[in-house]
């Protein structure tokens, strides 16, 4: 399928990740228990954003993504995104990372599913980039990186045809297939149904370039219209709105890809109802893991050096409502959790990294029962993010 | 006009691919086969007409004898030739041809895949049986492979490569009216909306090239010398195949059309799109005035679903079946 998915996947998933983290970091300040542990200063938040955005939009990393290649597996993507998140002073417990990943993916799935035209995937990506630029606007160096990446994306994707964009979109839809995790924000604003599926409207403006359905025109052999008739469409469609801007700056028009957590002040919680289908593919031995992990090694190698804080000053983020919930979820993580617990990923292009990653390949291949890793991080916690229930 | 019947449950959900439903009616055994593609797997269901027996099978796209090489499947379609029925599966790696029940693979054709991926994706898509003994398959480069199929056995050979399209093939269709008078045997469509009309033979002959309008034609059909084409803009256009004269233009759907089908005996047309709607139309030809009339008959809405496959289950259009992205069922409708 499409060999051009990765840059858009990282920009959009990374964007969603930043929206969620930004929301969590702010929610921290309104913690009810008034404990010192709960406070992130404005400076801390900015620092986290700058670190993560700087890593994501790193030139070498983006260049690696822009090479034509197949889409990675969920497992590999999650690994790289965790690495990106940990480029900051923030720490995520594996269970929280899993939840974060699900949220990110469901948001992106929603955007891809409802994307009016395949080409509008670019506008959705640009919405993410625009908002990211806002997050780091006080740090010119990082803004520069974002602009450079944006320019490259414009350069690479401007020449793609609608058919190629649709292939890209179809590749992404296969990647998201069978994921129906319910997100309370989406349920509240009714873009998602209780069964986890997204709502598809049969009314509203048609996409740019499409005409409102309902008309049959017949022509003679000379091309003159000889008859017009209308038919009932079963929906109520209206004319398209104007096209969004595909340049570096401009009004994108479509709303998909904007920060929903800010736009809908209705809900500041990121609670989950039940999870439904887990990513089946992650449980089966991935025979192509070795190939993917070679790609991963190159990607990691091109990212800047990891910010390794001393344990005492690391800030932890919990995406659950309580520490207990996180522990429980962590305990049921199984194989993947110990994977995170054991590995110490270094962003250095060296022999050690390559060997380390080859070892990961081995771990992917054997799905044995891993010993549970009780939440040893509890002692390191300086922060407990309490959500209001 | 139609009412919903009991759905057939399938093992996996359908992927968002054009024309993602294959139907083969086997009258002597009172069975119908259905195929639905899910990522790298083809789900096959054999449904008995009395509604009592369903049997399932899954096919993976892989090179014979190579354990790890599964790849994403683009399309699975039945090819009904006079002598035999076959199932063709196209993927990123190549083309597989099976006996129609999916039990045995009779032929494998590997695509040339470069060592390091190039900017253009490589895959096969667009499948059609043509006349007595040809199966045609499209490629992402725009080329069309013509396979010569013997009446039995696995001695299928690549007879010709047609290089006319410059963009990826999306769909192909053979003349389905059964009439021997039609000159055009095959129509092929590509990502730019260009349509090529062919006459089959030892050497296929290009009869006409109908230019597109920079919009993908995702599904195409050929009936009584008329090309019926569905586009990403939601439009359906009817052209006279050999001359390229535009007979009719329908603003049919609000989103990308994913599937078209024609019931050859009655002239019923089925269209399905990402807008969650399936529409039934009637085509009528008036040879004297050389005109084609399109009349709208019926709509079905599959709530919150982007439809990816829709096919009539019989030549009269008495029943049709529908698949949708992320849906693990084949929805069926029958005339009231």
Image (cartoon, coloured by chain):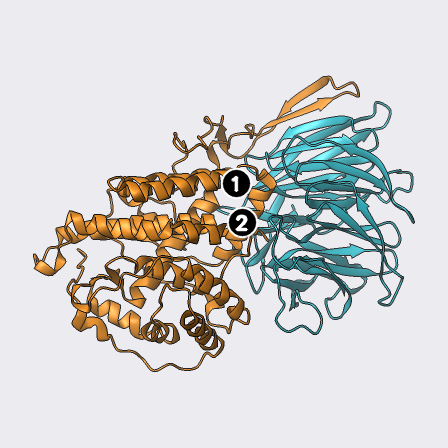
Chain colours: A orange, B cyan
Instruction: Verify CB contact (< 8 Å) between mark 1 and mark 2.
Output: yes
Q: Earlier in the sequence, mark 1 or mark 2?
A: 2
> Label 1: which residue?
A157
Q: Quadrant of the N terminus of chain B?
A: top right
Label ID, residue B109 = none
Q: Nearer the viewer, residue A355 or B307?
A: A355
Q: Is residue A153 left or right of residue A319?
A: right
Q: Nearer the viewer, residue A349 or B268?
A: A349
Q: Is residue A24 left or right of residue A252?
A: left
- The residue under the point 35% across, 61% down is A83
SS label for mark 1? helix
Say whether mark 2 and mark 1 are on the same chain: yes
Q: CA distance from mark 1 to mark 2?
A: 9 Å
Q: Nearer the viewer, residue A304 or A365?
A: A304
Mark 1 — on which chain does it sit?
A
Residue A360 x, y percent position in the rendering: 43, 73
Residue A187 in view: no
Q: Residue B295 sits in which quadrant?
A: top right
- The residue under the point 26% across, 60% down is A319
Residue B184 x, y percent position in the rendering: 85, 39
Q: Quadrant of the C terminus of chain B?
A: top right
Residue A286 x, y percent position in the rendering: 52, 71
Residue A255 x, y percent position in the rendering: 38, 37
How packed mark 1 is, by other alpha carbons closer than 10 Å (few <14, some 14-19, many 20 or more), is some
- The residue under the point 76% across, 45% down is B173
> Label 2: which residue?
A4
Q: How many labels were placed on the picture?
A: 2
Residue B328 in view: yes
Q: Is residue B238 above or below residue B155?
A: above
Q: Residue A379 sits in which quadrant?
A: bottom left
SS label for mark 2? loop
């Amino acid at each position: 399928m499409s060999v051009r998915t990765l840059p858009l996947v990282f920009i959009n998933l990374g964007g969603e990740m930043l929206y969620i983290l930004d929301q969590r970091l702010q929610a921290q300040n309104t913690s009810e228990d008034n404990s010192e542990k709960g406070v992130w200063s404005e400076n801390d938040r900015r620092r986290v954003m700058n670190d993560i955005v700087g890593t994501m939009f790193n030139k070498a990393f983006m260049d690696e993504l822009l090479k034509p290649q197949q889409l990675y597996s969920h497992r590999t993507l999650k690994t790289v995104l965790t690495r990106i998140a940990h480029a900051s002073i923030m720490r995520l417990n594996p269970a929280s990372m899993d939840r974060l990943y699900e949220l990110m993916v469901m948001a992106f799935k929603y955007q891809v599913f409802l994307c009016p035209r395949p080409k509008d995937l670019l506008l959705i990506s640009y919405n993410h980039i625009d908002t990211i630029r806002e997050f780091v606007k006080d740090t010119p160096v990082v803004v520069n990186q974002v602009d450079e990446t944006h320019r490259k994306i414009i350069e690479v994707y401007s020449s793609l045809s609608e058919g190629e964009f649709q292939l890209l979109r179809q590749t992404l839809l296969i990647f998201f297939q069978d994921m129906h995790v319910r997100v309370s924000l989406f349920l509240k604003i009714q873009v998602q149904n209780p069964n986890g599926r997204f709502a598809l409207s049969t009314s509203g403006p048609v996409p740019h370039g499409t005409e409102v359905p309902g008309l049959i025109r017949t022509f003679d052999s000379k091309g003159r219209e000889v008859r017009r008739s209308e038919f009932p469409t079963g929906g109520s469609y209206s004319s398209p709105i104007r096209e969004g801007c595909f340049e570096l700056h401009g009004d994108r028009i479509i709303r998909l890809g904007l920060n929903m957590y800010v736009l809908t002040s209705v809900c500041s919680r990121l609670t989950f109802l039940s999870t439904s289908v887990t990513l089946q593919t992650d449980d089966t031995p991935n025979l192509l893991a070795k190939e993917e992990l070679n790609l991963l090694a190159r990607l990691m190698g091109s990212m800047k050096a990891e910010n390794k804080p001393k344990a005492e000053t690391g800030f932890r983020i919990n995406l659950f409502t309580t520490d207990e919930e996180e522990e429980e979820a962590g305990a049921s993580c199984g194989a993947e959790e110990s994977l995170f617990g054991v590995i110490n990923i270094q962003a250095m292009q060296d022999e050690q990294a390559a060997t380390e990653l080859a070892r990961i390949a081995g771990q992917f291949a054997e799905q044995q029962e891993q010993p549970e890793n009780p939440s040893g991080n509890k002692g390191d916690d300086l922060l407990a993010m309490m959500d209001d229930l | 006009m139609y009412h919903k019947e009991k759905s057939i449950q399938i093992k996996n959900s359908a992927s968002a691919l054009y024309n993602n439903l294959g139907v083969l009616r086997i009258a002597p055994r009172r069975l119908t086969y259905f195929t639905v593609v899910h990522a790298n797997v083809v789900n096959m269901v054999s449904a008995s007409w009395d509604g009592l027996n369903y049997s399932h099978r899954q096919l993976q796209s892989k090179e014979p004898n190579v354990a790890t090489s599964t790849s994403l499947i683009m399309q699975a379609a039945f090819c009904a030739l006079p002598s035999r029925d076959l199932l063709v599966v196209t993927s990123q790696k190549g083309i597989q041809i099976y006996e129609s029940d999916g039990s045995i693979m009779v032929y494998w054709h590997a695509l040339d895949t470069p060592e390091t991926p190039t900017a253009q994706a490589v895959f096969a898509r667009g499948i059609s049986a043509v006349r007595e003994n040809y199966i045609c398959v499209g490629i992402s480069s725009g080329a069309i492979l013509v396979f010569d199929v013997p009446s039995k056995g696995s001695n299928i050979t690549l007879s010709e490569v047609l290089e006319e399209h410059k963009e990826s093939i999306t769909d192909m269709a053979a003349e389905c009216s059964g009439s021997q008078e039609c000159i055009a045997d095959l129509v092929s469509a590509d990502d730019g909306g260009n349509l090529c009309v062919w006459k089959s033979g030892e050497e296929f002959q290009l009869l006409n090239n109908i230019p597109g309008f920079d919009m993908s034609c995702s599904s195409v059909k050929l009936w009584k010398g008329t090309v019926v084409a569905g586009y990403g803009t939601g439009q359906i256009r009817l052209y006279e195949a050999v001359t390229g004269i535009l007979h009719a233009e329908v603003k049919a759907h609000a989103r990308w059309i994913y599937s078209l089908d024609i019931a050859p005996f009655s002239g019923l047309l089925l269209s399905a799109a990402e807008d969650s709607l399936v529409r039934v139309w009637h085509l009528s030809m008036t040879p004297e005035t050389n005109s084609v009339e399109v009349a709208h008959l019926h709509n079905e809405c599959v709530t919150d679903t982007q439809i990816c496959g829709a096919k009539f289950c019989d030549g009269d259009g008495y029943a049709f079946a529908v698949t949708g992205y992320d849906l693990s069922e084949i929805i069926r409708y029958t005339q009231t």
